[in-house]
Amino acid sequence: MKISQILSSVLLVLLASTSANAADAITGNESKATAAANEEQVREGKIINLQLDELTKQGGKYAYLQLSQKNRMSPFAVGVEANGAVIVLEVPKRETKATLTDKVLKLREMLKLAADGGKFVAGALFVQAKVPHQGIQVDGVAIELEHIKGLSIVRFSPYDLDLKSQKIKFRTPVDKDKPVVFFKDAKKKFNKA
């Protein structure tokens, strides 16, 4: 065998080995990038869940307080800021002539303005409601729940009220997807950033 043939064979083996190592390095980097992206998604999901949990917890407490004291509740909204601060919004009490529909529309507007202004990352509107189920009207709280990252549901939380003890027992809620309202424009701005 000639030296040139040996060098060609060695060069061919080196190129093949280098290509294999480069492919392994690329695959390893892709795996690391995929793992990092998955880890980021999990972390982001946990943050979203914490924000939504805080939103429903604080709103639930306020709904419970109103229902247990008056057996009714005025609609209200709750927003969560990026730092986790929770803000309760109500239509001013001086708006005595405002109908339930007027109040709901005003609260939706307030949530949308806060979302568009970048103040809230999550928001919910709480309204007392009755829903027909198996031929009877079921009392509950309807919650329009949204997050800037895309979650948008309406949750109906049925409850039973014992008037004597003024105790309320919430039953298992039912969730249904709904179109994004509060964060529709804010989501577009968020995705561009």
Image (cartoon, helix red, strand yellow):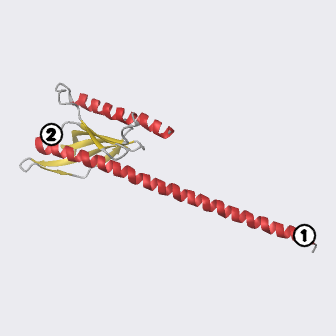
Q: Which residue is mark 1?
A: 5
Q: Where residue 14 appears, x then y in whole percent?
A: 78, 67
The answer to whether 166 appears left or right of 45 in the picture is left
Crowding near the residue tagged with mark 2, few <14, some 14–19, many ≥20 C-alpha atoms within 10 Å: some
For residue 43, say whether it is visible: yes
Label whose residue precedes the other's in the sequence (2 or 1): 1
Q: Residue furthest left?
A: 164
For residue 135, say whether it is visible: no
- SS at mark 2 in the image: loop
Quadrant that contains the N terminus: bottom right
Q: Residue furthest bottom?
A: 1
| Frontmost residue, 122 versus 71 | 122
Q: Where residue 26 appears, x then y in whole percent?
A: 65, 59
Crowding near the residue tagged with mark 1, few <14, some 14–19, many ≥20 C-alpha atoms within 10 Å: few
The answer to whether 157 appears left or right of 30 in the picture is left
As drawn, 97 above or below 153: above
Q: CA distance from mark 2 to mark 1?
A: 93 Å
As drawn, 56 above or below 95: below
Where on the picture, by quarter, is residue 132? top left
As drawn, 143 above or below 107: below
As drawn, 38 above or below 83: below
Q: Where residue 35 appears, x then y in whole percent?
A: 53, 59
Identify the residue at horizontal 25%, vertical 44% (top origin).
59
Where on the picture, by quarter, is residue 116? top left
The amino acid type of the residue labelled 1 equals Gln
Q: How many marks?
A: 2
The amino acid type of the residue labelled 2 equals Arg
- SS at mark 1 in the image: helix
Query: Which mark is drawn over residue 72?
Result: 2
Q: Which of the two discs, 2 and 1, sits closer to the camera? A: 1
Instruction: Determine contact: label 2, label 1, CB under 8 Å.
Output: no
Identify the residue at horizontal 28%, vertical 47% (top origin).
56
